[in-house]
Each structure stands twice: as structure tokens, then as C-alpha cells.
Image (spheres, helix red, strand yellow):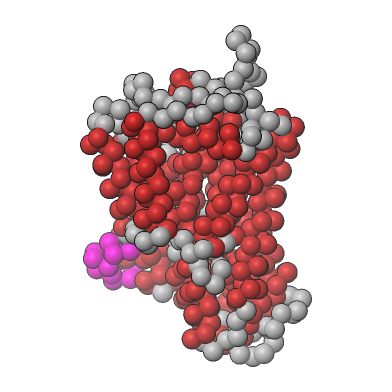
């Protein structure tokens, strides 16, 4: 058996074993990378370790550490109240606003993982505080970042346009951008109604403060897929909000925060009061945004720097933040990405692509290439996949049977929309920062949703953009 086929078989076995036994899939993937790389492909240890996603590791640790600090001292709760105050308590407006902000930031040039790293912790604060389904708010972040990801000035848009130009293929920047935006916006609408949007519309406006003695109904179970569930009883007191944010079911640590440095609640006619350390934390978050979006600094290293500064300024209130980093998630994501990096190194991805291209039926080959892009991108770098698959499609497009503009747009959509997978950078950030739902439950549901997108996304992109033949 060739190394390429053996590596695919090993990946399938890993998923089966991780499903049956309580073993972290990331640990299995690291073992698989070691065995397949050394025994089947003759790779050196340095080459195998070179596939480890060091940048992704730092992003996951840095961002979750920073927002663990922000949760401990009440800053996240303050941001939640401030956001709902701005939309005048209209619960149904919160998910679309999150989507639009995510799309806008990526459209003006911010990398999608950086936007997700900044917005996901804050968005999940909305979910936990106001009983919005965690999957609804998380997927609004994920699909929003991809909706704007192919503008002419964005990272992915620049890469695809550059690769197509180098390959001598015609390109339409507007078609590429609008295709990505339209597919992700459609997915966001489906997500809105699938995960409790109707219930948010029915609930109308959130009332920040309830009269004394008023008891709100308990939040729907986190396991539901409708009814606006997502866990966390909606309250307006900082103490209850704090308890929700440190619940053992939503964090990997059972160490509660003991600080009394919490935000004052919002009132319909009043302001929002910040303590000194909350103001410093908020300044740090803004500094992170500016450093990443304006000065293009690394999001992970910048987040760690801000977190360390905050820890030094108030050690007592930030106690226990390191324990709240989602270490099992970090192992899971980094292990799987390392294994996929080994697959790319030994040529498994190229082998699959060449096998697909050899079929000879243009429309069918186009569909299969879209699926290759979607499946591989769900586990690996979207940037790397697009850089590899666009040139792979050149021989097919040179036949003149398929429109290159449509094919490149479909391939781009197929490779990017699957970034909701928990094994992608964006999906991993969602799992690491989730609030309002047990992390394991959220991971399983995000994995199921990601699987559905991997199956439906490439097919939809091919059916709408390629099959009709309406784009040259």
C-alpha cells in the first residue's frame, strides 16, 4: 500500500478510535503523524515537527488567556451589556450585527482568524448573558469572517487573484467577492432560523433590570437546536453574570473567580461604569484590535503580550486565568493540523487532486475538485489549499469547456465556507472561547454542522456557479 493511501486509512481509523474511546483526537493525530511520517514516508523528526502549527497554537493560547482575564474581572460582561444597550435590547438584532461586523473587518483586509479571535469571545458573552444559542452567535462570527474574505483588498482575495493572474486565467474581483458574501449570508440566514432566531424575534426587546421578586424562566437546555437556547439564565446583576461566566460546564477549570472587580449593570437611562482594571483590560483589547488590523502584528503574540501586561497590573484578580485556557482543544486542533501537514508533505493531497483530474468529464471533475478543496480546507489552511488547487484546475480550464471565473469562484467558496469546521483556525477559536454551552457539546454540534457544510457547500457552489455555464 502506498504512503498516500495508508495515510488516508490512518486518518479514518483515528476518527473511529476517538469516537469509541475517551482519547483526545489530537494526541492520536500526533502519534499518526509520527508513525506515518517515519515508517511510511521516511520523514525526519524535524520535518514532522515542522508541520506543527506554531502560529495557531499561539493564537489559541494567547486569545483564550486574554479573554479569560477579561472574563475574570468582568470586562466581557461589561462589553455584553454595552452591545445590547446600543441595539436598545433588540435580541434578534445581535446575531446580524455580529455577522456584519465580522464581514466588514475581513473585507477591509483583516485576516479571518484575527477577526474571529477578537470577536468570538465577545460574541459568546452575548450568547451566555442573553440566552442566545451559542452555535447561532458562533456561526455568525464564522460565516461573517468568510463573507468578506474575498474582497480585492482582503488576504484571501489577494491570494486567489494573484494565483489566477500568474496562471494566465481571467478574473472578476466583484464576482469572487459577491459569490463568497452571498453563500455565507445565505448560510447565516439558515443558521439564524435553525438555532433559535424565531425565538429571539418572539422575545423582542431584552429588559435590562427586572423588578424585585421577578423570576425569569430558566434558559432552554443547551442541547436544543431551536428556541434560542444556549444556556445561562439571563440576569442583570453582575454577580449572577459572573457565575455564569465561570460555570464549570463552560470552562475547562472549576476554579471560580473570587475577585469583586465586576462591572456595574446597564440601566435603560443610565451609563455603564467601569472599574480601573476593567478600563485597562478594555484598552488592551482595543490595542489588540489596532495592532492586528492596522499594523498587521501577529494576533497570537500580541494577545499574549496584552495578557501578560494585564496579569502584572492586577495579579490577584487574574488568578486562575491560565487554567482556563482550553488546553484539550489546543491539543486536539494542533494535533490534527500537524497530521494534515504531514499528509501535504508526503503528497497525499496532490495525489488525490491528480486522481480526480484524471477522470476526464469536465463538470464532474469540477465538482470533485471543489470537494477536494472543501474537505482538505476543513482540516488545513485555506490559504494553502487555494494556492495549490487553483493551479491544479488550470489544465481543466484551458480546455474551454468551463468558465474560469465561475470555477475559481466556486473553488474559493468551497474551500472557505468550510472554515466553520472545529479543525480550522476559525472553528478552533469558536470551540476554545465558547460560553453558554458545555464545550464538548458545542464541539460535537459544530463538528456535525461543519460536516454538513463540507457535504453541501461545494455542491451548492458548483450547482450555482459552474453547472449553468453563465459565467465565462
Q: Is residue 128 above or below residue 153?
A: above
Quadrant of the rendered structure where residue 344 is?
Answer: bottom left
- What is the magenta range? 40-51
Q: Quadrant of the N terminus?
A: bottom left
Q: What percent of the width, then of the height, locates residue 23?
A: 40, 42
Tell me the residue at 60%/10% (across/down): 212
Residue 157 location, x and y as percent?
Answer: 53, 71
The one nearer the camera, 104 or 52, is 104
Residue sitting at the far top:
213
Q: How many marks?
A: 0
Does 42 appear in magenta?
yes
Q: Residue at left 52%, top 41%?
A: 123
Q: Identify which residue is drawn at 70% across, 75% down.
A: 466
Q: Which residue is rendered at x = 23% and y = 65% of the image? A: 46
Q: Is residue 71 visible?
A: no
Q: Nearer the viewer, residue 131 or 329?
A: 131
Residue 432 placement, left or right of 368: left
Residue 138 magenta: no
Asked if residue 209 is positioned above or below residue 382 in the image, the reply reads above
Residue 104 makes an appearance in the image: yes
Residue 37 occupies which quadrant of the picture?
A: bottom left
Locate the C terminus and report the quarter of the image it occupies.
Answer: bottom right
Foreground residue among 1 and 386: 386
In the rendered image, residue 17, in percent from the top left (x then y), is placed at 45, 47
The x and y percentages for residue 39 are: 30, 66
The relative height of residue 32 versus residue 3 in the rendered view (above or below) is: above
Amino acid at each position: 500500500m502506498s504512503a498516500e493511501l495508508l495515510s488516508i486509512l490512518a486518518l479514518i481509523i483515528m476518527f473511529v478510535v476517538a469516537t469509541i474511546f475517551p482519547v483526545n483526537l489530537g494526541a492520536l493525530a500526533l502519534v499518526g503523524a509520527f508513525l506515518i511520517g517515519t515508517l511510511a514516508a521516511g520523514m525526519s523528526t524535524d520535518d514532522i515537527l515542522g508541520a506543527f502549527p506554531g502560529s495557531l497554537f499561539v493564537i489559541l493560547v494567547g486569545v483564550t488567556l486574554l479573554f479569560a482575564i477579561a472574563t475574570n474581572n468582568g470586562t466581557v460582561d461589561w462589553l455584553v451589556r454595552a452591545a445590547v444597550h446600543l441595539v436598545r435590547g433588540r435580541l434578534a438584532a445581535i446575531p446580524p450585527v455580529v455577522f456584519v461586523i465580522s464581514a466588514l473587518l475581513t473585507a477591509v483586509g483583516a485576516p479571518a482568524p484575527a477577526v474571529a479571535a477578537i470577536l468570538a469571545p465577545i460574541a459568546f458573552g452575548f450568547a451566555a448573558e442573553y440566552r442566545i444559542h451559542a452555535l447561532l452567535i458562533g456561526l455568525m462570527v464564522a460565516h461573517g469572517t468568510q463573507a468578506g474574505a474575498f474582497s480585492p483588498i482582503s488576504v484571501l482575495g489577494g491570494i486567489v487573484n494573484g494565483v489566477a493572474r500568474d496562471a494566465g486565467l481571467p478574473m472578476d474581483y466583484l464576482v469572487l467577492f459577491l459569490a463568497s458574501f452571498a453563500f455565507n449570508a445565505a448560510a447565516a440566514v439558515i443558521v439564524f432560523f435553525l438555532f433559535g432566531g424565531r425565538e429571539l424575534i418572539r422575545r423582542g426587546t431584552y429588559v435590562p433590570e427586572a423588578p424585585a421578586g421577578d423570576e425569569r424562566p430558566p434558559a432552554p437546555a443547551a442541547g436544543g437546536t431551536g428556541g434560542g437556547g444556549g444556556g445561562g439564565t439571563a440576569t442583570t446583576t453582575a454577580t449572577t453574570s459572573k457565575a455564569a461566566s465561570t460555570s464549570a460546564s463552560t470552562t475547562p477549570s472549576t476554579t471560580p473567580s473570587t475577585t469583586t472587580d465586576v462591572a456595574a449593570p446597564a440601566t435603560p437611562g443610565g451609563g455603564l461604569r467601569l472599574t480601573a482594571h476593567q478600563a485597562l483590560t478594555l484598552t488592551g483589547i482595543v490595542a489588540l484590535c489596532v495592532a492586528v488590523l492596522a499594523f498587521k502584528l501577529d494576533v497570537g503574540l500580541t494577545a499574549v503580550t496584552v495578557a501578560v501586561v494585564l496579569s502584572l497590573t492586577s495579579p490577584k484578580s487574574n488568578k486562575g486565568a491560565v487554567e482556563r485556557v482550553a488546553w484539550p482543544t489546543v491539543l486536539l486542533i494542533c494535533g490534527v493540523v500537524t497530521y494534515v501537514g504531514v499528509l501535504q508533505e508526503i503528497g497525499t493531497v496532490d495525489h488525490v487532486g491528480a486522481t480526480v483530474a484524471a477522470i476526464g468529464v469536465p463538470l464532474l471533475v469540477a465538482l470533485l475538485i471543489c470537494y477536494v478543496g472543501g474537505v482538505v480546507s476543513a482540516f488545513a489552511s485555506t490559504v494553502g489549499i487555494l494556492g495549490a488547487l487553483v493551479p491544479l484546475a488550470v489544465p481543466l480550464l484551458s480546455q474551454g469547456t468551463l468558465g474560469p471565473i465561475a470555477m475559481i469562484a466556486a473553488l474559493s467558496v468551497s474551500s472557505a465556507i468550510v472554515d466553520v469546521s472545529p479543525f480550522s483556525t476559525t472553528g478552533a477559536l469558536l470551540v476554545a472561547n465558547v460560553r453558554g454551552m458545555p464545550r464538548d457539546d458545542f464541539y460535537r454540534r459544530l463538528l456535525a454542522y461543519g460536516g454538513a457544510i463540507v457535504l453541501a457547500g461545494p455542491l451548492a457552489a458548483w450547482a450555482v456557479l459552474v453547472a449553468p455555464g453563465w459565467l465565462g
